[in-house]
Amino acid sequence: MALEHALLVSLSERPASGLDLTRRFDRSIGFFWSATHQQIYRVLARMETDGWVRSEVVAQTGRPDKKVYAVAPAGAEELARWLAEPAPAESFRSEVAVRLRGASYGDRRAVLAQVEALLADHRTRLGHYEHLAERDFPEPDRLSGHDLDVYLVLRGGIRLEQFWVGWLTEYRDTHARAHEGAPA
C-alpha cells in the first residue's frame, strides 16, 4: 500500500485540507499507517497533478486560505482498483523481537527496562482504543457498511495491542520468575 491509498480512503470518508488529514492520521489512520505532515502535502500535490484528487481554495477569517481536497473520479477508480487487487500477506518484522531474542548477549536489565516502557505504551494505546470503541460504537451489533468497517479495524487495533501487552507481560514475568532466588 502506498500513502496515496490511505489518503484516498480518508478523503473518501470526508474531504479535507492537508492539515485536517494530518490530524486524522494522528488520531486514527496513523495507528496503522504513519505519515509526516510533509509527506502528506507532497503526496497530495502529486495526486492532484495525477488527477486523483481535486482541490478547492476555501477562504478563512483571520487565517490564510486553505486548500480542501476531495477524491476525483480518477482517484475513485484507482482506489477501487487497489481495493480489488489481492493484498500481500502481512509480514511480522519487529526490532523488539530481535532485541528480546538477543537479550542474553547484552544487558538484560536494559532490555527489561525497554520491555517495561513498551508495555506502558501498549497499555496506553489499548486503553485509548477501548475508549474509542465504547464511545463511538456502543452498539456494535447494529453497525453496517462504513461504520462496521471502521469498527472492525478498531477491533483489530485492540486485538493487536492485547497481543503486545500479553506477550511483553509474559516475557517480563517469565524472566522475573526465572531469576527469583538467583544470585545477582
Image (cartoon, grey):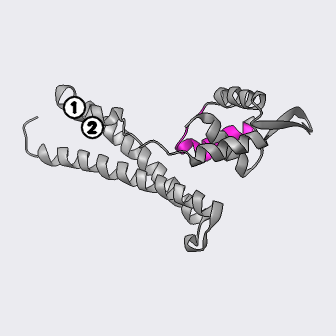
Q: Horizontally, is 43 left or right of 182 in the view? A: right
Location of residue 30 by image quarter? top right
Of the two numbered discs 2 and 1 in the rendering, the one whose residue sits closer to the viewer: 1
Q: Depth check: 9 or 58 in front?
A: 9
Tell me the residue that label 1 is attached to. Answer: 103
What is the three-letter code of the residue carrying label 2? Leu
User: Which residue is depicted at the point 46% across and 49% down?
Assistant: 124
Q: Residue 32 magenta-drawn?
A: yes
Name which residue lies at 22% across and 49% down: 173
The answer to whether mark 2 and mark 1 are in CB contact below 8 A is yes
Quadrant of the image containing the C terminus: top left
Decide if residue 23 is in sight here. no
Residue labelled with disc 2: 112
Q: Residue at x 71, y 51 (%)?
A: 13
Q: Which residues are magenta?
A: 19-35
Decide which of 82, 110 is in the foreground and name it: 82
Count numbered badges in the picture: 2
Q: Is residue 8 above or below residue 106?
A: below
Badge 1 amino acid: Ala
Q: Is residue 146 left or right of residue 49?
A: left
**Majority secondary structure of magenta residues:** helix
For mark 2, does the 10 Å Cα neighbourhood hold few (<14), some (14 to 19), or many (20 or more) residues?
Answer: some
Q: Is residue 162 magenta?
A: no
* Residue 79 on image: x %, y %: 66, 44
- Tell me the SS state at disc 2: helix
The earlier-in-sequence mark between 2 and 1 is 1
- Secondary structure under badge 1? helix
Q: Residue 145 at what x, y percent from top left? A: 64, 64
Q: Measure how far apart labels 2 and 1 are at the Cα level.
A: 9 Å
Tell which of 180 and 160 is nearer to you.
160
Name the side, left or right, on which 124 lies relative to 175.
Answer: right
